[in-house]
Image: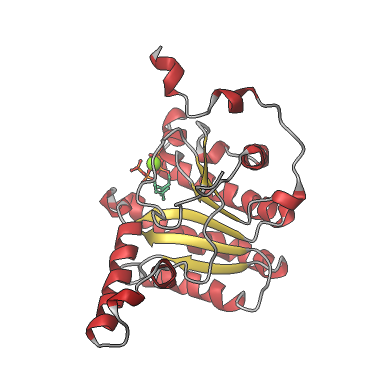
Amino acid sequence: MLEKFSNWKSKAEQEKKDEPIRLDNVPKHVAIIMDGNGRWAKKRGLPRIAGHREGMNVINKMVRQANSLGVEVLTLYAFSTENWKRPKNEVDFLMRLPERYLSVELPKLIEENVKVRLMGCKDSLPTHTIKAVDNAIEKTKENTGLILNFALNYGSRDEIVTAIQAIATKVAEGKINPSDVSNTLVSEHLMTSELRDPDLLIRTSGEIRLSNFMLWQLAYTEFWFTDVLWPDFTEQHFLEAVNVYQQRTRRYGGI
Ligand code: IPE
Ligand code: IPE
Ligand code: MG
């Protein structure tokens, strides 16, 4: 009996057949919680950082895939504000990943018209990490294709607190009235101010939680969870998620 309720998929969804992807209904903003690198490594008797290295290679595939499908924004959760709790050697390795990734991939991203963007608190990131990301942002700033939004040292609660502080300051200074605070105004004070809300959220590794990710922005997003560990995630899995998305009915509270 318990088993029946432990699956996150509805019965109808489990029985649905794969349909061909409809290019007129591709999620415009896809957000991914890339989870399971550590477990992938552990299963192979490797150190956790080997999982992160492998996971980095999957990013390329997803960028190409998103771009070819016509996705407009791909947000990737790479490091949370809570991930500082990890052992120093792991954190150091993760902080080197952006420059490793970009030193190889930036020329391709430039050529493929991808625009790199950062979402997260820059203050506590090491200088070498910021330098690599800033360089990529600068070199791709004129690009008009896929927006590749890296969530690095990102935490949704911190983001909301910062927005509230900024709004409260404006109220205290008399620049706006409390009654001017609206959904739109709050959205404009978040790190995603110029992005649309995600249409599809993917989380790998079998964890069914948000782990402090985009709490405000995910209000009406479709969720898709998979047991697949991030380093094993393929284009086919991405298509499966899009497929399920296309079979959902988004009602936004309507009928
Ligand atoms: C996701 O994989 C990557 C980051 C959080 C940086 P994990 O490192 O969380 O892998 P697991 O969850 O321990 O398997
Ligand atoms: C979420 O994964 C953060 C990233 C994928 C970057 P975690 O592995 O940190 O999440 P918890 O700790 O299992 O909730
Ligand atoms: Mg994890």
From what the image shows, is residue 174 above or below residue 179?
Answer: below
Q: Where residue 251 sits: x, y (%)?
A: 56, 46
The quarter of the picture where the C terminus appears is top right
Q: Give the quadrant of ligand 1.
A: top left
Toward the top, the furthest residue is 1
Say if 75 sits above or below 193 in the image. above
Work out whether residue 69 can be spotted: yes
- Residue 206 x %, y %: 45, 32
Instruction: Count up the numbered dots.
Output: 0
Is 252 on the left or on the right of 160, as rendered? Answer: right
Q: Residue furthest left?
A: 172
At x 57%, y 65%, the residue is 103
What residue lies at 56% left-to-right and 72% top-to-bottom?
Answer: 136
Residue at (66, 26) in percent of width and height: 16
- On the question of residue 155 being in view, the answer is no
Residue 95: image quadrant is: bottom left
Residue 37 found in image quarter:
top left
Q: Residue at x 49, y 70 (%)?
A: 133
- Percent x, y for residue 216? 40, 57
Examine the image and state in which quarter residue 162 appears. bottom left
Q: Nearer the viewer, residue 172 or 116?
A: 172
**Which quarter shows the N terminus?**
top left
Q: Is residue 227 shown left or right of residue 190?
A: right
